[in-house]
């Protein structure tokens, strides 16, 4: 079951793809397109003229985390050890670094501290739910995902993660019930399709699962996926 959790939970900390670097772009545009290489270059240039600036170091910690450079992210966040510098954003970024380091209990603690400081970012609940999921604390994970939903987070991502929790608990029909209407409304969503296929296979609906997978994968890929998923089921 660890394979399914690792593969399917939508960890928003990973898979960030930066746009081509453009040092002349404004920081607003760099952040908008997720150009973290450009963001790092921008703030390192600022740090050269404003050494030890806490806001700059926090931005660098966040950008390095998105790039997967956890050592650099940890270095910059560790410089902000004064309580007066540790606001909601600090705890949120610290938690994201914890997640990238697979320190899930520390991540949950820091997400809670960010929430207590009224962070205005519903992604905190999604990430916290994912951390709970990795620890097999499904009830807490579901509660966190529902909080994300109540704070306006993307319904499809929330429902996908809720369905993944059901699959992890072998409540596969519930996962089918959650994902089927989502898939009908968004059949091009590859993640939803894949998760629904898993739940269908686990409820002995291989034909439907095959049809769904074939809309996103080649026939040979579909055969391989079905074989792997059936093996996982066994």
Image (cartoon, rainbow, N blue to C red):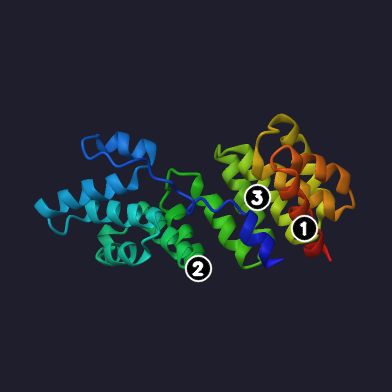
Quick one: SS at disc 3? helix
Q: Which residue lies furthest to the top in this view?
A: 185
Q: How far apart are marks 1 and 2 (CA)?
A: 25 Å
Residue at the (39%, 61%) spot, across then down: 94
Locate the C terminus by quadrant.
bottom right
Name the residue tied to disc 1: 229
**Left or right side of 67 for 83:** left
Q: Position of residue 134 (x, y in %)?
A: 61, 65
Quarter of the figure with residue 224: bottom right
Which is nearer the eye, 26 or 145?
Answer: 26
Quick one: SS at disc 1? helix
Q: Position of residue 184 (x, y in %)?
A: 75, 32
Q: Confirm or deny contact between disc 3 and disc 1 (CB under 8 A).
A: no
Quick one: SS at disc 2? loop
Give the mark nearer the N terminus: 3 vs 2: 2
Q: Which mark is residue 102?
A: 2
Q: Position of residue 110 (x, y in %)?
A: 44, 62
**Left or right side of 174 for 117:** left
**Left or right side of 75 for 98:** right
Q: In this view, does 20 lie above or below 66?
A: above
Q: Position of residue 155 (x, y in %)?
A: 63, 38
Give the mark nearer the N terminus: 1 vs 2: 2
Residue at the (24%, 51%) spot, across then down: 55
Give the mark nearer the N terminus: 3 vs 1: 3
Name the residue tied to disc 3: 161
Q: Distance between the residues labelled 3 and 2?
A: 18 Å
Q: Is residue 84 above or below residue 191?
A: below
Residue at the (65%, 60%) spot, across then down: 5
Q: Confirm or deny contact between disc 3 and disc 2 (CB under 8 A).
A: no
Which is nearer the eye, 18 or 184?
Answer: 18
For mark 2, does the 10 Å Cα neighbourhood hold few (<14), some (14 to 19), or many (20 or more) residues? few
Which is nearer the eye, 191 or 231?
Answer: 231
């Amino acid at each position: 079951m660890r394979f399914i959790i690792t593969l399917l939970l939508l960890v928003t900390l990973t898979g960030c793809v930066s746009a081509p670097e453009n040092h002349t772009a404004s920081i607003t545009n760099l952040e908008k397109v997720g150009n973290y290489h450009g963001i790092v270059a921008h703030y390192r240039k600022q740090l050269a003229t404003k050494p030890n600036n806490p806001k700059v170091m926090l931005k660098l910690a966040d950008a390095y985390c998105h790039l997967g450079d956890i050592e650099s992210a940890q270095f910059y966040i560790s410089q902000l050890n004064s309580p007066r510098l540790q606001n909601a954003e600090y705890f949120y970024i610290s938690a994201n670094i914890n997640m990238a380091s697979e320190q899930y209990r520390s991540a949950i603690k820091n997400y809670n501290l960010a929430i207590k400081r009224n962070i205005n970012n519903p992604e905190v609940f999604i990430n916290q739910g994912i951390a709970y999921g990795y620890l097999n604390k499904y009830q807490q994970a579901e509660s966190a995902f529902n909080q994300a939903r109540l704070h306006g987070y993307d319904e499809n991502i929330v429902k996908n993660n809720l369905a993944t929790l059901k699959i992890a608990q072998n409540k596969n029909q519930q996962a089918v019930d959650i994902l089927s209407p989502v898939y009908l409304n968004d059949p091009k969503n590859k993640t939803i399709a894949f998760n629904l296929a898993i739940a269908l296979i686990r409820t002995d609906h291989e034909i439907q699962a095959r049809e769904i997978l074939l809309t996103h994968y080649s026939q040979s890929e579909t055969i391989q996926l079905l074989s792997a998923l059936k093996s996982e089921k066994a």
